[in-house]
Image (cartoon, helix red, strand yellow):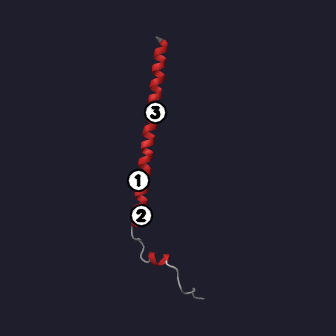
């Protein structure tokens, strides 16, 4: 009987580890999804600083000397 209880404890421990692994995987996938949505929102938003869009365009004039 004692070996049966030991086996039950091992099965229980493995089940807990497996449950934690599933929870970790689900949270990782959720976090990646949230990060992608935030990056997409940042890239599609207009610039918040006035004139920032002009900074991205190259200047055709040489700098004054």
Quadrant including the C terminus: bottom right
Q: CA distance from mark 2 to mark 3?
A: 36 Å
First in residue order: circle 2 vs circle 3: 3
SS type, badge 2: helix
Res. 22 image quadrant: top left
First in residue order: circle 1 vs circle 3: 3
The vertical placement of 28 against 15, above or below, is: below
The vertical placement of 14 against 53, above or below, is: above
**In the image: residue 33, left or right of residue 64:** left
Q: Counting other residues with Cα less than 10 Å from the Cα at mark 1, is it few (<14), some (14-19), or many (20 or more)?
A: few
| Circle number at residue 18 | 3
| Circle number at residue 34 | 1
Q: Counting other residues with Cα less than 10 Å from the Cα at mark 2, is it few (<14), some (14-19), or many (20 or more)?
A: few
Q: Counting other residues with Cα less than 10 Å from the Cα at mark 3, is it few (<14), some (14-19), or many (20 or more)?
A: few
Q: Position of residue 8 (x, y in %)?
A: 45, 20
Q: CA distance from mark 2 to mark 1?
A: 12 Å
| Circle number at residue 42 | 2
Task: Tell me whether circle 2 and circle 1 mark residues in contact (CB < 8 Å).
Answer: no
SS type, badge 3: helix
Going 43% across and 34% down the picture, which residue do you hit? 19
The vertical placement of 25 against 45, above or below, is: above
Q: Position of residue 20 (x, y in %)?
A: 45, 35
**In the image: residue 24, left or right of residue 64:** left
Q: Please state which of the two labelled residues, at mark 2 or mark 3, is closer to the viewer.
A: 3
Task: Tell me whether circle 1 and circle 3 mark residues in contact (CB < 8 Å).
Answer: no
Going 42% across and 39% down the picture, which residue do you hit? 23
Q: Which residue is farthest top?
A: 1
**In the image: residue 65, left or right of residue 18:** right
Q: Position of residue 43 (x, y in %)?
A: 43, 65
């Amino acid at each position: 009987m004692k070996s049966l209880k030991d086996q039950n404890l091992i099965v229980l421990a493995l089940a807990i580890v497996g449950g934690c692994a599933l929870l970790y995987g689900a949270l990782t996938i959720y976090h990646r999804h949230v990060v992608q949505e935030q990056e997409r929102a940042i890239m599609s938003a207009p610039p918040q600083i006035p004139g920032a869009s002009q900074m991205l365009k190259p200047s055709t004039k040489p700098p004054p000397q």
